[in-house]
Image (spheres, rainbow, N blue to C red):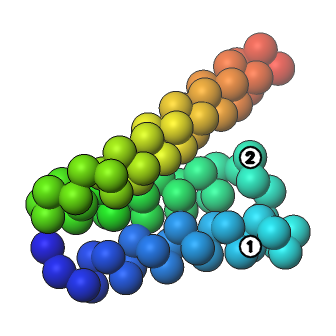
Amino acid sequence: MGPYIQIGGAILVLLGYVLGQLGRIDTGSKSYLLINLIGSALLAADALAGRQWGFLVLNGVWAVISLIYLIRLLTDTARSANTSA
């Protein structure tokens, strides 16, 4: 895919991490999970294209975990909105 995908994905993952460590973003928030999902998915796709299996496992699992928690957060938010209405 190319270095731009790698650099973009790495910047997103690191951005989420740095913002979380600085307390600028909640590490359980939709924004944090979305940043990690996009960044790790880009890195996983690039690793797959380059047949870099270790990086594919690392970033693929990172993306799946981010997606699971993002879906859980969104469904919990929707459920809470429906019960309070």
Residue 3 x/y as whole percent: 24, 84
> Looking at numbered disc 1 in the image, what kind of residue is underneath it?
Leu
Relative image position of residue 7 (x, y in whole percent):
37, 82
Residue farthest toward the front in the current orientation of the protein: 54
Residue 41 visible, this orientation: no
Q: Does residue 48 appear to the left or right of 68 in the view shown? A: left
Residue 69: quadrant of the picture = top right
Q: Which residue is mark 1?
A: 19
Q: Type of residue at label 2?
A: Gly
Where is residue 72? Give x, y as percent.
60, 28
Which circle marks residue 74 in the picture?
A: none
Q: Are marks 2 and 1 in contact (CB under 8 Å)?
A: no
How many numbered discs, if any? 2
Camera-side residue: 28 or 56? Answer: 56
Coordinates of residue 78 in the picture (x, y in percent): 64, 27
Q: Residue at x 58, y 73 (%)?
A: 14
The residue under label 2 is 28
Q: Is residue 49 visible?
A: yes
In the structure shown, which secondary structural element does the residue marked by tag 2 occupy? loop
